[in-house]
Amino acid sequence: MEKSPELALTQMRKSVEKLGFSTENYGDPTLMRFLIARSMDIEKAAKMFVQWLKWRSSIVPNGFIAESEVPDQLEARKIFLQEFIVYVIDKAIASGVRGRETGNEKFICIVDFQQLTYKNADTRGYITGFQILQSYFPERLAKMYALHIPRFFVSVWKMVCRFLDKATQEKIVIVTNEDEKKCFVEEVGEEAVPIEYGGKAKLTAIQDVPPLEG
């Protein structure tokens, strides 16, 4: 018999406590993300949540990554892994919050591979980035659109996909022609897609996004 969400959440909180940790500072929507990521398996979700708590306290001991910690990456105006990818995802989630955070905030990611060459294609880096996203930001990615993928990258992408959960793979859309580009703009919305990719939005570097008030 399938458990109700309320019962699953109660049991998960108890399972986390048995592992020596507390869920006191986290609401139901946050815990539900871990349950969904583990197909509502209580024990697996509790273990994933505890692993996330340990990882978060280790890599982000202050609760957030300040811009002063990643000045070189921001200056280059491109994304790097580890601390910087955490900074990017945290800011993406925060920028979508209106009023009080619900724990359900998700983001759409547009990745432009136009300047990618064989020499700077970092397969291990891509795998690490997705593993961080899957393991420590469950149910945060709504969809990712990959644009201007070069031919050589097809083999690289196949290797990366071996390390992705099926649910994550289903959220990734590779845009290869004008019809798919049109669908991409329609799905995301012209007002949200940058002008450079056929929409009406201004492309803004992440460090130029104003901080939220309050």
Image (spheres, rainbow, N blue to C red):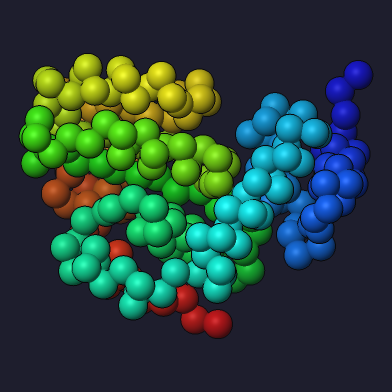
Residue 201 percent across, percent down from the top left: 24, 57
Task: Please provide percent x and percent y for residue 191.
Answer: 30, 53
Question: For the point 83% across and 47% down, which residue is it?
Answer: 19
- Asked if residue 171 can be seen in this view, the reply is yes
**Residue 6, placed above or below residue 155:** below
User: Considering only vertical position in the picture, is 4 above or below 13?
Assistant: above
Left/right placement of residue 53 relative to residue 3 reads left
Q: Is residue 206 left or right of residue 200?
A: right
Residue sitting nearer the eye, 152 or 173: 152
Q: Residue furthest bottom?
A: 214
* Occupied quadrant, residue 118: top left
What residue lies at 91% left-to-right and 19% top-to-bottom?
Answer: 1
How many numbered discs sit on the rendered protein? 0
On the image, the x and y values in percent for residue 125 come to 30, 39
Give the image location of residue 185, x and y in percent.
Answer: 28, 38
The answer to whether any part of residue 145 appears in the image is no
The one of 107 and 122 positioned closer to us in this rendering: 122
Please name whichever residue, 108 or 157, is drawn nearer the observer in this view of the structure: 157
Determine the image quadrant of residue 154: top left
- At 19% from the left edge and 61% from the top edge, which residue is drawn? 77
Q: Image point 55% across, 82% down: which residue? A: 214
Q: Check the image and report above or below for 149 versus 95.
A: above
Q: Image check: 150 left or right of 20?
A: left
Is 159 on the left-hand or right-hand side of 24?
left
